[in-house]
Amino acid sequence: MKKIKSCIVLFVLIIAMSFACSYINNDKYKETVSNTAVKYYENVVAITFDDGPRRSTTVRLLDGLKELNVKATFFVMGKNIIGNEDIIKRMYDEGHLIGNHTYSHVDLSDVSHDTAIQEIEATNNLIYDITGYMPKYIRPPFGSYSDKLQLEINMIPVMWSVDPNDWNTTYVAGVVNSVVSKVKSGDIILLHDFYDSSVTAALEIIAQLKAKGYIFVTVDQIMLD
């Protein structure tokens, strides 16, 4: 009888130790996952492109992004979509985020309210007709926006934290250094896919930041908090 009781006690102890080991291992796993998530969060950056699409430059950029396995955010102008519908479709199919940059790059605070709405809705409709996706994000030209407009169109305005003024220079190395030397985790980089020099700079920026351990995400991911 004593042997049976001893066996039962021993069996219970083995089960208890198994649960304890399992609990310890789970804690280690949680810690690993947590650290990975923190590391991921501490190394993210979003690269964004305004003013396109333009066939001669945007296609080259898309080719480069595909080769580098990077997703970007494109704030497109409605008038530049016309004739470039296939490029918009490619952006969408390859997993990039497409946002609105108005139809004709107007200062939304410098036109009538009705005109501002028309500029935004016309571009949204073009994107939707091509992709079936209705844009949720808008980059207002010159950063001009209003609370009234935001309430009415129910879109999220996206500004930027790193701006190398690439539209104003063809000096590729200067644009690259301006971004790489300043960028930090959580930044949104503003570039343009309308200029050859900007595309060349963008691909070099991505290569250098990836070498530093940065992970590129679209603005909808970086703005989640």
Image: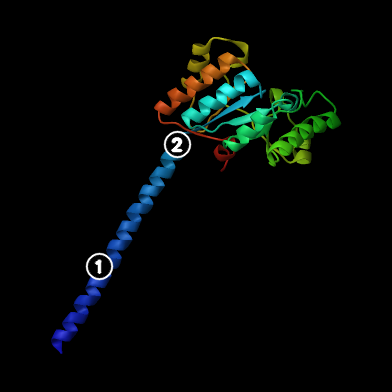
In this rendering, does residue 41 appear at all? yes
| x and y, in percent, of residue 89 in the image | 65, 34
Crowd tier of the residue under label 1, counting other residues whose Cα lies within 10 Å: few below 14, some 14–19, many 20 or above: few
**Residue 136's disc number:** none
**Residue positioned 61% across, 23% down in the render:** 58
**Residue positioned 38% across, 53% down in the render:** 30
SS at badge 1 = helix
Residue 55 as seen in the image, left or right of residue 5: right
| x and y, in percent, of residue 90 in the image | 61, 33
Please name the amino acid that badge 1 sits on. Met
**Residue positioned 64% across, 29% down in the render:** 87
Residue 43 as seen in the image, left or right of residue 114: left
| x and y, in percent, of residue 132 in the image | 70, 42
| x and y, in percent, of residue 22 in the image | 31, 62
Q: CA distance from mark 1 to mark 2?
A: 37 Å
Q: Is residue 20 above or below residue 176?
A: below
Residue that label 1 marks: 17
SS at badge 2 = loop
Q: Is residue 12 above or below residue 139?
A: below
Residue 142 as seen in the image, left or right of residue 18: right
Please name the amino acid that badge 2 sits on. Glu
Q: Depth check: 107 or 89 in front?
A: 89
